Image (cartoon, grey):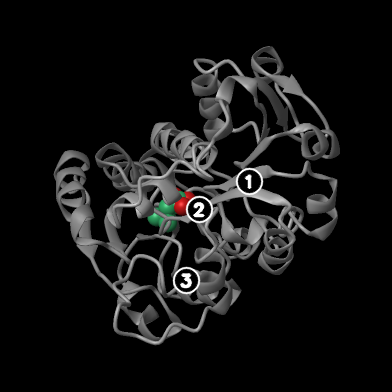
Amino acid sequence: MKLIAFECREDELAAFEKYAALLDVQIECRAECLLPENIDETGGYDAVSMLGRSCMNSAMMEGLAARGVRFVCGRTVGYDHVDVAAARRCGIRVSHSSYSPEGVSDFTLMLMLMSLRKYKQALFRGNVNDYSLEGLRGRQMQSMTIGVVGGGRIGRAVIRKLGGFGPRVLVYDPHPSAELRATAECVGLETLFVQSDIITLHTPLTDATRHMIDRQALAMMKHGVIVINTARGELIDTQAMIEALEDGKIGALGLDVIEQEEGVYHRDRRTDIIKNRNMAYVRQFPNVIMTPHCAFYTDEAVEEMVGGAVQAAVDFARKGETPLEVRG
Ligand code: COI
């Protein structure tokens, strides 16, 4: 089995080495994205692995199949950047990562607490010896109604962790399981928007969920609502969110992701001109906390992302087995 991995960060290399030895896979690691320009690099490999920035459209699937690639094993959660239907047509099997939800769910609760307790202001003020209390009065988790959008692994981990704080928890999922029903109040999306003090997004990005937080959704929400997004930037219509922030409707916003973050996040862009105006504008609001898509980034997750991708390729090849979380 030969696998070529793209978008490899330095911190993934040890895990690639470990799983190459453990699973007897020949692995070539490349820092660059997989793009039409370098698709020839994949010739002679059975499997390709990538994060979320490579081009995985229909033409690329045809190109990969023509070069003998049979498996595409993503190291991120979801298929929002992969044309799975095209892969299927080309006979390529696709997997995505199913690393532990603990890191992202921990981070989500951290953003909720930071937002509720106005931590950004407290931290910034302390740095200039301003120790005033004005404007820092927060609210307590226990008195909140928290709406979790998406009852998958991350949404369920968030609900489990919220249990320790004692809020009322609502959850919206289009196909709620019995397990989910037992852990939180399953409600429709509109009810969740109307009743929640804090709304947190844990749903994949699809055509149906793109801009699910739009003007109409924002209009339904409570004045002072807190919105947290550790999933995908495109779930929120940023322009509509900016208007809601300017109108004072939003109590706080915690964003680990934002529309058009590609090419900005996960890079040092200190001396560059960055053209994402919305990103720069949203960041300056006193009640907005933004982090650079790092909720996933833990020792444990990095190991699992790499290990899961290599294992998926091995399962596909060796036994025709279907690894966990495979659709293609
Ligand atoms: C994912 O795994 O889906 C992520 O969002 C993390 C990715 C940017 C490396």
Marks counted in the figure total 3
Closer to the camera in the image, 165 or 105: 165
Residue 173 in the image: x percent, y percent? 73, 33
158 vs 94: above or below: above
Instruction: Give me the C-alpha separation between circle 2 and circle 1.
Output: 32 Å
Q: Report which residue position mark 3 lands on.
A: 262
Quarter of the rendering containing residue 185? top right
Q: Is residue 239 visible?
A: yes
Marked residue nearer the N-terminal end (2 or 3): 2
Residue 192 in the image: x percent, y percent? 78, 34
Instruction: Give me the C-alpha separation between circle 3 and circle 1.
Output: 22 Å
30 vs 171: above or below: below
The label number, if any, that marks residue 70 in the structure image: none
- Residue type at mark 3 is Glu
Mark 2 or 1, which is nearer the eye? 1
Residues marked 2 and 1 touching at CB (< 8 Å): no
Q: Would the CB of label 1 be found within 8 Å of ligand 1?
A: no
Quarter of the rendering containing residue 42? bottom left
Q: Is residue 252 rendered to the left or right of residue 270?
A: right
Residue 266 in the image: x percent, y percent? 34, 65
101 vs 236: above or below: above
- For label 2, the crowd category at 10 Å Cα-Cα, with few meaning under 14, some 14 to 19 and many 20 or more, is many
Q: Is residue 76 visible?
A: no
The kind of secondary structure element at disc 2 is strand
Q: Report which residue position mark 2 lands on.
A: 94
